[in-house]
Image (tube, coloured by chain):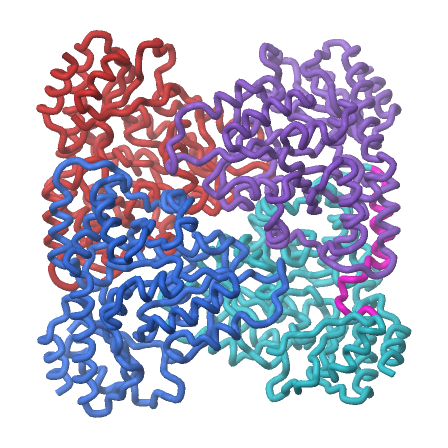
Chain colours: A purple, B cyan, C red, D blue
Amino acid sequence: MIFGSDNMLGASQQVLDAIVRANAGLAASYGADDWCAQATAELAKVFECQVDVFYVSTGTVANSLALSALVPPWGAVLCHHQAHIINDESSAPELFTGGARLIPINDRAGKLQPQALRDALAGAPHPPHNVLPRALSLTQASECGLVYSQEEVSALAAIAHDHDLRVHMDGARFANAVASLDCSPADVTWRAGVDVLCLGASKNGALMAEAIVFFDPELAEDFAYRVKRAGQMGAKGRFFGAQFCGWLQDDHWLSMAGHANAMAQRLEAALLKLPGVRATWPVQANEVFVLMPTALATRLRGAGAVFYDWHLNALPPGVTRQDDESFVRLVCGFGTQVEQIDALVAAAG
Amino acid sequence: MIFGSDNMLGASQQVLDAIVRANAGLAASYGADDWCAQATAELAKVFECQVDVFYVSTGTVANSLALSALVPPWGAVLCHHQAHIINDESSAPELFTGGARLIPINDRAGKLQPQALRDALAGAPHPPHNVLPRALSLTQASECGLVYSQEEVSALAAIAHDHDLRVHMDGARFANAVASLDCSPADVTWRAGVDVLCLGASKNGALMAEAIVFFDPELAEDFAYRVKRAGQMGAKGRFFGAQFCGWLQDDHWLSMAGHANAMAQRLEAALLKLPGVRATWPVQANEVFVLMPTALATRLRGAGAVFYDWHLNALPPGVTRQDDESFVRLVCGFGTQVEQIDALVAAAG
Amino acid sequence: MIFGSDNMLGASQQVLDAIVRANAGLAASYGADDWCAQATAELAKVFECQVDVFYVSTGTVANSLALSALVPPWGAVLCHHQAHIINDESSAPELFTGGARLIPINDRAGKLQPQALRDALAGAPHPPHNVLPRALSLTQASECGLVYSQEEVSALAAIAHDHDLRVHMDGARFANAVASLDCSPADVTWRAGVDVLCLGASKNGALMAEAIVFFDPELAEDFAYRVKRAGQMGAKGRFFGAQFCGWLQDDHWLSMAGHANAMAQRLEAALLKLPGVRATWPVQANEVFVLMPTALATRLRGAGAVFYDWHLNALPPGVTRQDDESFVRLVCGFGTQVEQIDALVAAAG
Amino acid sequence: MIFGSDNMLGASQQVLDAIVRANAGLAASYGADDWCAQATAELAKVFECQVDVFYVSTGTVANSLALSALVPPWGAVLCHHQAHIINDESSAPELFTGGARLIPINDRAGKLQPQALRDALAGAPHPPHNVLPRALSLTQASECGLVYSQEEVSALAAIAHDHDLRVHMDGARFANAVASLDCSPADVTWRAGVDVLCLGASKNGALMAEAIVFFDPELAEDFAYRVKRAGQMGAKGRFFGAQFCGWLQDDHWLSMAGHANAMAQRLEAALLKLPGVRATWPVQANEVFVLMPTALATRLRGAGAVFYDWHLNALPPGVTRQDDESFVRLVCGFGTQVEQIDALVAAAG
């Protein structure tokens, strides 16, 4: 009954097999190996275009490094006020961008709305006294477990580009979003105006691997220097490549994400049948956010369930937590099984 | 016949097995798992003392982060002019220390000499106009494949401490040094005055794992913030822990290093029998540095051998490369086999 | 009719005289001169305590450097959402703190309220994933021209200290606040819990000089290194000292500030008599914020008046700008004369 | 008898008069005033070309900011091992460049030699593992008081440009060099390949003012952001402009520098007549380096003379200090008078 985070699982068997396979023999170091080359070729197919790809070990460094290619040290990145980059990555963005600023947009709609972005960009800037907004960061799936449609990404990216901002997508759960939308990965990235995607594999079946995918080769020009300088040019780069090879093969990544999404749907349905549990956000990816009686939350945890209380400012507008309620998040992953959901329901007694 | 670097090999079977074992089931994220706890307990045994340990993905980030705990942004790190931190890690040290400086000591003796260190520290400093030397970085085994004895480390560390410098050890090949010295790891680290050791496993049988080992708990106080901010707090931290568990178990790390050292001895002996090959530095760890006729180097490479030309400023004093000679480095690893050495000799024909 | 900013004036005659006097002869460089020593002794008298003082050339660098002594690179500074440090100093705070973050508090009360600060500090922090709040920055006089009383500073500082935050005061208009409160400078600084004050002279009669005044000697310990590294250790430091000597002598600084405040009162009274002009914030220092018919603003500017439109999010709660209104700020300085105010009224026709 | 440094003098009367003149009335803030505009127009005449000019308060910040426009954070700046930027500016270069590295060239010839530069650039670089040399910094007049001729600057700049390095000139004593060469300022800057000059006025008659002069407009594109972010966009920018107006008017800067140079010649001649005093470097600008009996140095200082012992590694090749000798530097400035030199000689008794 572990619904704490999708990163509490290990790697999928297919990814692990690829690692074991890649381990045999000698290979060029620092990413100049065949596995990385093959992974990048696969990603080009997945995204139906030329891509420049860099492999790193965590989502935090992926996001921060990608942003460093988009904004100067006197620039700013606009993002949702609940974005992982502003809430959960310490000041890594400041470190890797050389001191650029994150500007939170206080949007309560669960994903960024065009008007909120326009408001944030309004007002006569006063250069060089202010920081200079130069990037928009979107999280797909969003901070509240919602998924941006192609139209929604396009609308936001168009506003961004109109203001000389580049568009970064934090895709820690990109696989879940694509599985949910059932669209081409290209449709919700470069075709919709995304300039760089941080494609997360670690939360969805990899051991430790993230890909920074540039759709604009100019942005990637000096990027190897940034990767090296961040201490991310792993000597045995083949293991990043191998993970992605295993992850992408036969749409494994989408199967895993689809499974996690389905489990989340099932979990939500089961929870909503329990007395006193109230829906908050619709479940569109692999995260379930509900209000539940605190007594119930306590009982479930007492029975061994793991899930986190969530930030109250992430509640939908108009929804208020009662004194005896808890606002909680439950996450499903590639390894979540029906039995765990059944056990949770049983524990609710 | 791959003698290019010890990082061209994959992981040892024992390390890989530990990863596979750790993959099963759920685990707490971000290093709060049992594998990391066990690895740290093992390291405490290995070093015969309390240690604060942080696991990261590369040697570059290990060194840079460790140094950031020793020197302020207006400080300086003294190191050998051939040190990996100054030659091969881009400006990662500057990034992670917030702009501290590396000061090269032009010592030609293959490892730092006390007098050279004293000279570098001489002269009336002029604070706050100058940068402030606050750390000494030693590489064990050294840049020329030599090993610092306990007495040598102690002598250097004593000078450093007398000048208010802390002592950092870049232990990318620490295992090879310990295997060579056949001493307790404690003897050449904290007992000799080392404050923090970057213990490299990646070059010696791990897949991707380095441990930053603090012997002074004060230095480790805020270090989790540094690790997080560097994008090194891997969600699935258990895989760092697992690698070290496998690596340390039954002195596996020392066996592998001892094997690599023995292979290097054998390789040197074989090379020196070839016509025109001249020794430069004694082989004390797993690296062999020789001068060889360029024609021979070409022939060997033509037969598939991989090894690198080396920096001429790394030649011992008094040794000069002739016009028709190449100064080359050959490295043995845990997986190097006698057959490869025999094949090399055969190729020399 | 120049009410654009108090920095559009030059230096007062008394300050200029001190510069001319200090120019004669030779003096030790880098702040080791008699003028700096005397200025610091005067400041100790003004603040009735031992102080560590560092002189720099701008308010931006004063604030950023002072904050760098309070927060680590993974720390955060809480401040009013209209604070100069977050709106008008580019990313200088990030540069000098090594990448710490400014967190805006969206308080609409014209100066920070204790409850808003408590709210910003509420919620279980999640170290090391979040940035760590370690400083509160207050602006005295405030962003809306209001003045914090000793009780108000004390209340905020107490909350800050309870949460392990140090207290920074941006005193670009500190003289105006003290003149308005008619209190001892000590009362609204260290006696109320302020740890470091950036005492601005440039906006109030100096040529180019700001003093960073530490009330806690520990915070000042390494500060000379920060000043040097910021390129602020001026060779001819005596000119900073001389400006402050002239500025402090015979309470010149308070006389000038008192005059500016009185002019602001008079200006407000005159403006409020004009048809359609509406008050917004009470005038407590030297800034006047009013809503006026846009037609009037246009007429005044046509007649040569200089003043700026102001940010709408700085309006008091409940006050709304009408479509035909402008929200404007007018600033008085030590050199503002009654005739200018009369001329403005006359121009209003 | 103050020969410690040229920064121990105040401002010249002509510069001071300009400040006093500029003080009257109101002016636009942040450098948008008429004085700055006029100063820049004058500099365009002086350099016979379009220039982009930014005014800052110290040489340290001028050099560091200028370099930040030339090298990325993973880049390196080559400079003489005695350069002010590497020896006397703390880690300001690292701070403002975002962590780029200074690489010292151990040239003993008193000014950089083409061969030493070529050697430093030799060797196969190994990107992105190494830092990337992207700028050469020359000091004019040099660290040993020598002056680079147009041919010498051209030769070095040509090598630099051939290797994709831009050329920075630290012109803290540029006026002395031009006065010594009696050439057009353009000849030893952009016509010889200099991309950006830090033109120092503080050491030669200004109060506190340095100009960063870009000869390539592309380098200046984002520079206002760098200046602002460095806390160098002084509110009352007119005072920088006024100083340069006064400094440049009627070739005042060259007259002052010429006087200082002449005094240095005279001082050297007088010193060399004293028993036991030995020349080291020829006097080409306003600095005198000699070896003198330590007993003499003590006697002179006892009589009130101020001058500094100098770094032994700045001695010319082949010249060795005897045990009873001191290697000392004496500096003349715009205000040095014959009487001081006579008094020094008299004190030598």
Q: Quadrant of the N terminus of chain D?
A: bottom left
Residue A96 on the magenta span: no
Residue that appears at 14% across and 66% down: D335
Q: Nearer the viewer, residue B293 or A145?
A: B293
- Give the total number of marks visible in the rendering: 0
Task: Find residue D96 and report its horizontal and vertical position in percent.
Answer: 43, 52
Residue that appears at 22% across and 42% down: C48
Residue numbers of the magenta segment = B1-25
Question: In the picture shown, does residue A188 fall above or below D286?
Answer: above
Question: In the picture shown, does residue B187 fall above or below A22?
Answer: below
Task: Find residue C204 and report its horizontal and vertical position in percent.
Answer: 20, 36
Q: Is residue A16 left or right of residue D181?
A: right
> In this view of the protein, can residue C53 be seen by the observer?
no
> In this view of the protein, can residue C239 be seen by the observer?
yes
Residue B17 on the magenta span: yes
Q: Residue furthest toward the right? A: B339
Residue that appears at 15% across and 19% down: C344
Q: Quadrant of the C terminus of chain D?
A: bottom left
Question: In the picture shown, does residue B36 fall above or below C190?
Answer: below
Q: Nearer the viewer, residue D230 or B143?
A: D230
User: In the figure, residue D142 lies in which quadrant?
Assistant: bottom left
Task: Find residue C274 and report its horizontal and vertical position in percent.
Answer: 18, 10
Q: Is residue C310 left or right of residue B256?
A: left
